[in-house]
Each structure stands twice: as C-alpha cells, then as structure tokens.
Amino acid sequence: MKNTILSIRNLHKVYKGQEHEVVALNKVSFDLNEGEILAIMGTSGSGKSTLLNIIGALDEPNQGEIVLQNKKQKDIFTEPEATLYRSQNIGFIFQAYHLLKDLTVEENIALPLILKGTKRDEISNKVDNMLRIVGLKEWRNHRPFQLSGGQQQRVAIGRALITSPPIVLADEPTGNLDFNTSTDILKVLKDMKDQFNQSIIIVTHDPYVATFADRVMFFHDGHIVDELICQQDEKDMDRILSKFRKIMEYSK
Ligand SMILES: Nc1ncnc2c1ncn2[C@@H]1O[C@H](COP(=O)(O)OP(=O)(O)OP(=O)(O)O)[C@@H](O)[C@H]1O
Ligand SMILES: [Mg+2]
C-alpha cells in the first residue's frame, strides 16, 4: 500500500494581463506518493512551472488546496509562513543552478542548514556526507565558476537535499546538460531518493529523463491530459514518446 504524501486539489491559477487572462492551471488535482518520482511533461506554456512554483509556495493559486502529510496547508502563500513551509518541506532544483557565486561548494551546500541555525558539528557531518553522495569531495573549496555545468547542478542538488525535505521539486534540472551528465545527475537523484525516501517531481521536455520516473503526467493548456505508469523496462522510452507525441500534436 502506497502512502500519499502530497494531495493537490483543484489548483487553479489565472494570470491577469493588461489585454487578456491566461488560465495557467485549470483545476488540477493529483496525488504524489511517498518515495515516488513523478515526471511532468507537456507543451510549452501548459502550466508545469506554475504548478511547481505553487507547490513550493513561490506563487499563489486563485483556488485550490495543498494537503501535505494529511495536513491542509493554510497561509503558506504569505510570509513568514511561506519561508517556514519551504524550509521544512521543499527542496528546489532549477535549470539555472542559482548557486551563490561568492560561496564555495561546501558553503553553498551548507547554506540551508546555516539558515536553520543547525549546530556546527551537525552541519559539518551532513555536508561531508552530502559531498560524498554528489561526488564533489575534492571540489569542496572551489567556487561555482570553477565547475562544469554538471558539477554545479550536483552542488544545487546537494543544497536542495541537505535538509532532507520530504518533497523535491525539479524544473528542467538537466535542461542545460549533455546526455552523460544528465544521466549522472538523474542517478544521483535516484540514489538519494533510495536512501532518504523523498518524493520528487521533475518537469522535463526530455523523454529520456522521464524514463527515470515511476509515473509520467502529461500537461496541456493547464490540464492533466494523460498519464503513464513506467514499467521500468526498455520499452518505457517508446511508451513515453508515443504519449508525448500525441500531446505535442495538440499545440500544432
Ligand atoms: N508571472 C506570470 N505572469 C503572467 N503570465 C504568466 C506568468 N507566469 C506564467 N505565465 C503564463 O502562464 C502559462 C503557463 O506558464 P508556465 O511557465 O507554467 O508554463 P510551462 O509549462 O512551464 O512552459 P515551458 O515548458 O515553456 O517552461 C503561460 O501561458 C505563461 O505565459
Ligand atoms: Mg516551465
């Protein structure tokens, strides 16, 4: 029996422009299981980033509910609750790594713990462990500009996961990386998930990235229009591609 960690209920988001409105999310509902990797694919502008931003309390919906670990999340879209909610529950990984350029690798990874007021010894142990997992022990004193894109993304993953958040939100995490580096990043994410049982939502345009997921949801025009449970065999790629092609037809 799988446990639901996150329930999204009727999430609705309208952006009001000067000329017209855009319905970015149209009453979206779904459940995310504990330890599940969920990939979200879809047409450009279909609301994928908006969804992640709302789950991460970076953006506010017009309607709908977020239920996390059976608790309805109220007031998470205003400060200081938003920051607290994020620091306790959410790890973000973006396409652009958003590292702090003046901090070293280990300082970047340690940052969420420092902000939480974690004790020095505990920070040191956790950061050592994380540097080992993301394979950056020898790079700990380097600064972001001295690293490759894949290494920078590994720092970002280390920083996102150092507080062991139950939910990890990744928006095109391999968007800037080549095939081998993407594979490497996805394996790191999967290894960590196996170790800490996190639930991960990955937005991607790349069917190969989606093969790392347990389930793929397809978005178009603010709706979930299709879904696929991965069988974890070599035919997943074809299954994903076939559904993805259908979705892409919608936007023509
Ligand atoms: N801050 C904003 N103000 C106004 N409109 C917005 C804003 N953010 C997103 N939108 C609109 O909402 C819709 C959904 O955008 P969103 O960024 O969620 O799409 P997406 O699925 O992530 O697309 P992509 O694959 O191109 O990243 C789009 O039509 C977009 O133009
Ligand atoms: Mg997007």
Image (cartoon, helix red, strand yellow):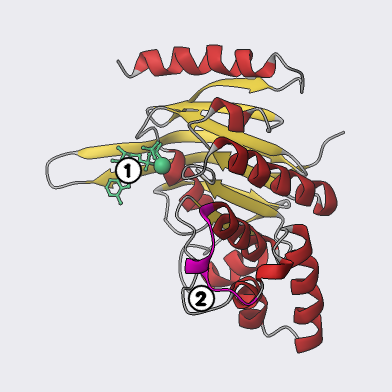
The percent position of residue 54, horizontal first and vertical second, equals: 48, 51
The percent position of residue 109, horizontal first and vertical second, equals: 64, 71
Q: Earlier in the sequence, mark 2 or mark 1?
A: 1
In the rendered image, the quadrant that contains the N terminus is top right
Marker disc for residue 14:
1
Viewer can see residue 8: no
Helix, strand or loop at disc 1?
Answer: strand
Which is more toward the observer, 109 or 40?
A: 109
* Three-letter amino acid code at the position of disc 2: Pro
- Give the residues drawn in magenta, as a range: 141-149
Q: Residue 130 is drawn in which quadrant? A: bottom right
The percent position of residue 59, horizontal first and vertical second, equals: 42, 56
Q: Is residue 206 above or below residue 90?
A: above
Quarter, ligand 1:
top left
User: Disc 2 designates what residue?
Assistant: 80
Q: Is residue 226 above or below residue 76?
A: above
Classify residue 153 as left or right of residue 17: right
Q: CA distance from mark 2 to mark 1?
A: 24 Å
Viewer can see residue 238: yes
Q: Residue 87 is drawn in which quadrant? A: bottom right
Determine whether the beta carbon of the residue marked 2 sits less than 8 angstroms from the nearest atom of ligand 1: no
Determine if the magenta segment contains residue 147: yes
Marker disc for residue 226:
none
Q: Residues within 10 Å of mark 2 (few under 14, many from 20)?
A: few
Determine if the magenta segment contains residue 59: no
Instruction: Check if mark 2's residue and mark 1's residue have beta carbons within 8 Å.
Output: no
Residue at figure coordinates x 55%, y 59% from the top left: 152
Residue at figure coordinates x 64%, y 52% from the top left: 168
Q: Residues within 10 Å of mark 1 (few under 14, many from 20)?
A: some
* Three-letter amino acid code at the position of disc 1: Val
Residue at figure coordinates x 68%, y 39% from the top left: 32
In the rendered image, the quadrant that contains the C terminus is top left
